[in-house]
Image (spheres, helix red, strand yellow):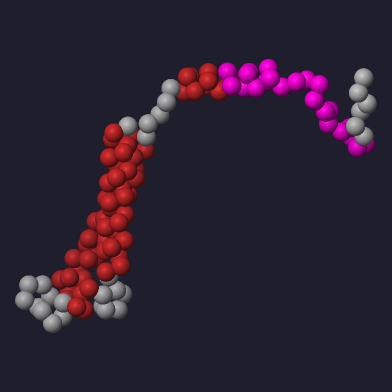
Amino acid sequence: MAAYVTIGVLIIITCVLLVLIVLVQSSKGGGLASSFSSSNQFMGVRKTADFLEKATWTLAVVLLVFSLFSIFVIPRGNVAQIDTELREQLENAMENQPVEDFVPPPSQDGEVPDEE
């Protein structure tokens, strides 16, 4: 159960980071990369755009891997125990159902048969 919660938290963090990275980008070059055009000391505009694109693809792959891995850590109960509990609930419901309230379905000609 702890692995499932951990993977779930990692998936949420990855999704939030992916959304932020995608929102920072701009298809016309007017995103975060355009604000760095005046200060080219450390990284140029093209390097920033490359970094954002690589970060997007990396986070997308990480999200895919976490999603696929989560299948293996989903907590599963004992199927036989669940089946037994459902059978007991069904039997209890059938025992409490009064037979007198049963209404037969209509016949093919649309008439309800008379009660005997």
Q: Residue furthest bottom?
A: 38
Q: Is residue 103 magenta?
A: yes
How many numbered discs? 0
Q: Quadrant of residue 5?
A: top left
Q: Residue at x 71, y 22 (%)?
A: 97
Above or below, comparing residue 10 to residue 109 in the picture: below
State whether residue 61 appears in this view: no
- From the viewer's perspective, tell me whether residue 71 is left or right of residue 81: left
Q: Quadrant of residue 18?
A: bottom left
Q: Residue at x 27, y 69 (%)?
A: 24
Above or below, comparing residue 113 to residue 26 in the picture: above
Image quadrant where one finds the C terminus:
top right
- From the viewer's perspective, tell me whether residue 76 is left or right of residue 42: right
Q: Nearer the viewer, residue 17 or 65?
A: 17
Identify the magenta region.
88-110
Above or below, comparing residue 67 to residue 29 in the picture: above
Q: Residue at x 29, y 41 (%)?
A: 7
Q: Nearer the viewer, residue 103 or 27?
A: 103
Q: Is residue 74 magenta?
A: no
Above or below, comparing residue 39 to residue 73 in the picture: below
Q: In the rendering, at what x and y percent does residue 54 appear?
A: 22, 62
Q: In the rendering, at what x and y percent does residue 73 appear?
A: 33, 34
Q: In the rendering, at what x and y percent does residue 70 appear?
A: 34, 40
Q: Residue at x 30, y 56 (%)?
A: 16
State whether residue 106 appears in this view: yes
- From the viewer's perspective, tell me whether residue 83 is left or right of residue 78: right
Image quadrant where one finds the N terminus:
top left
